[in-house]
Image: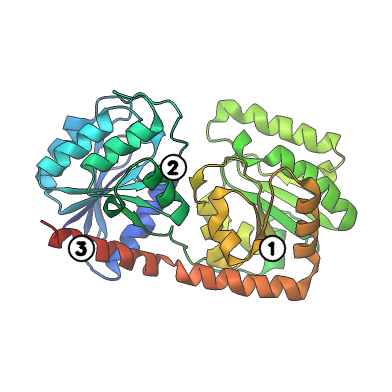
């Protein structure tokens, strides 16, 4: 069985890259074949024991024939496509690519990481909406893969056949827990504080202005609380937003009990930051069906988290509703966060639940579902 992936890849340290790398390593625990990666230009051509990477397309061009030519050379049985609208667009190129891959005898599986509202506008013709684009994908893909039942329901409601949809959770990567005090010393953080961490790329949809408002209330209840915002904007020209958030924290009187990392967090610092954290806060406000990679990083190290009670965090609300709070309700958020920081018996109970969730969605478990899907697709005529 020959398996290929269509994505952006190393050295691009974006979500699709990490996802694909974890998926390849997980699948190879069950089937040891080397995988192929058809990657966006800017990714590095490479051959390792685990994969061969062939850069072959640009998101800024009509990428169909370039990808198709390389796919024909590799002749995979299945190609897993890490789809996002910024990488492949929401126009006719992508459905056309799927149709040509199918015609070449290749089974394309599209990992749809987010299902947006059906009436949002796109460049697909005819129709011009997200729902039209999703239906066009479903017409030509062997499967549309989503991460939650809500995402599946959203696709069903826009008329996509159930047999074209498969639900596979996002994987959780096990992360080594380091000594918390040592990590705090190394990172220059208060050693005895109760540490709230926000981790990841920064943009207005992540709800950081709301989190600052919440943390001001938390600091009144938990005087030794400290907030670390570990991340930066995806594009440096937007760094002024972080400058604004720093100023906002100072205006709220929490400048001395908060710190902004100020740049992209390098891979070797990630385990240190998660190890140092008491609670990871995810105050996002984008209410469309999706999942969060940060949730699965947090689950992989077994840390407490508090997430917005929105579609993106359905998984965590199902683990325990005490791990979510309504976005915009700063009082409930502050009370929940303060209790997670101070109520040790409750915290340990919830931490055990999070660890079980992390084990159930480990990359080894999730990747086995992908292998089973490949075998199912090969059996279909």
- Check disc 3 and report the residue beneath it: 376
Q: Is residue 361 left or right of residue 63?
A: right
Q: How crowded is mark 2: few (under 14 residues within 10 Å), some or many (20 or more)?
A: some
Q: Which residue is drawn at 15% across and 37% down?
A: 100
Position in image of residue 38 (x %, y %): 24, 43
Q: Quick check: 157 above or below 338?
A: above
- Residue 208 can be seen, yes or no: yes
The CA span between labels 1 and 3 is 38 Å
- Check disc 2 and report the residue beneath it: 115
The colour scheme of the drawn protein is rainbow
Label 2 residue SS: strand
Q: Residue at x 27, y 42 (%)?
A: 138
Q: Is residue 289 left or right of residue 82?
A: right
Q: Which residue is drawn at 34% across and 48% down?
A: 111
The image's mark for residue 322 is 1
Q: Residues within 10 Å of mark 3 (few under 14, many from 20)?
A: few
Q: Is residue 91 left or right of residue 246?
A: left
Position in image of residue 169 (x %, y %): 42, 59
Label 1 residue SS: helix
Q: On the image, which quarter does residue 92 sit in? A: top left
Position in image of residue 75 (x %, y %): 11, 49
Mark 1–mark 3 contact, CB under 8 Å? no
Foreground residue, 207 or 73? 207
Q: In which quarter of the image is the N terminus?
A: bottom left
The CA span between labels 3 and 2 is 25 Å
Label 3 residue SS: helix
């Amino acid at each position: 069985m020959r398996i290929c992936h269509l994505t952006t890849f190393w050295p691009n340290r974006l979500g699709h890259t990490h996802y694909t790398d974890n998926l390849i390593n997980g699948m190879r625990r069950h089937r040891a074949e080397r995988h192929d990666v058809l990657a966006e230009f800017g990714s590095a051509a490479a051959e390792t024991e685990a994969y061969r990477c062939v850069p072959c397309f640009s998101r800024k061009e009509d990428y169909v024939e370039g990808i198709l030519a390389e796919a024909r050379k590799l002749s995979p049985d299945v190609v897993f496509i890490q789809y996002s609208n910024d990488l492949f667009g929401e126009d006719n190129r992508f459905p056309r690519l799927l149709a040509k891959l199918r015609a070449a005898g290749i089974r394309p599986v599209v990992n749809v990481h987010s299902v947006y509202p059906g009436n949002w506008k796109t460049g697909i013709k005819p129709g011009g909406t997200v729902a039209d684009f999703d239906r066009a994908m479903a017409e030509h893909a062997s499967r549309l893969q989503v991460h939650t039942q809500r995402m599946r329901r959203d696709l069903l409601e826009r008329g996509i056949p159930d047999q074209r949809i498969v639900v596979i959770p996002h994987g959780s990567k096990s992360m080594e827990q380091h000594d918390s005090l040592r990590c705090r010393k190394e990172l220059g953080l208060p050693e005895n504080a109760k540490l709230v961490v926000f981790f990841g790329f920064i943009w207005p949809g992540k709800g950081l202005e709301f989190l600052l408002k919440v943390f001001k209330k938390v600091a009144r209840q938990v005087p030794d609380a400290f907030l670390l915002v570990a991340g930066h904007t995806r594009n440096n020209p937007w760094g002024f937003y972080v400058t604004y958030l720093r100023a906002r924290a100072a205006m709220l009187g929490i400048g001395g009990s908060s710190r902004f990392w100020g740049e992209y967090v390098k891979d070797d610092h990630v385990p240190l930051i998660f190890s140092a954290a008491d609670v990871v806060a995810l105050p996002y406000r984008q209410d469309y069906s999706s999942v969060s990679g940060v949730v699965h990083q947090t689950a992989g190290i077994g840390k407490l988290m508090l997430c917005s009670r929105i579609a993106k965090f359905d998984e965590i609300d199902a683990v325990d509703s005490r791990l979510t709070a309504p976005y915009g309700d700063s009082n409930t958020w502050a009370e929940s966060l303060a209790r997670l920081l101070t109520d040790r018996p409750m915290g340990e109970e919830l931490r055990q639940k999070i660890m079980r969730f992390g084990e159930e969605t480990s990359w080894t478990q999730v990747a086995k579902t992908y292998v089973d899907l490949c075998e199912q697709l090969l059996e279909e005529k």
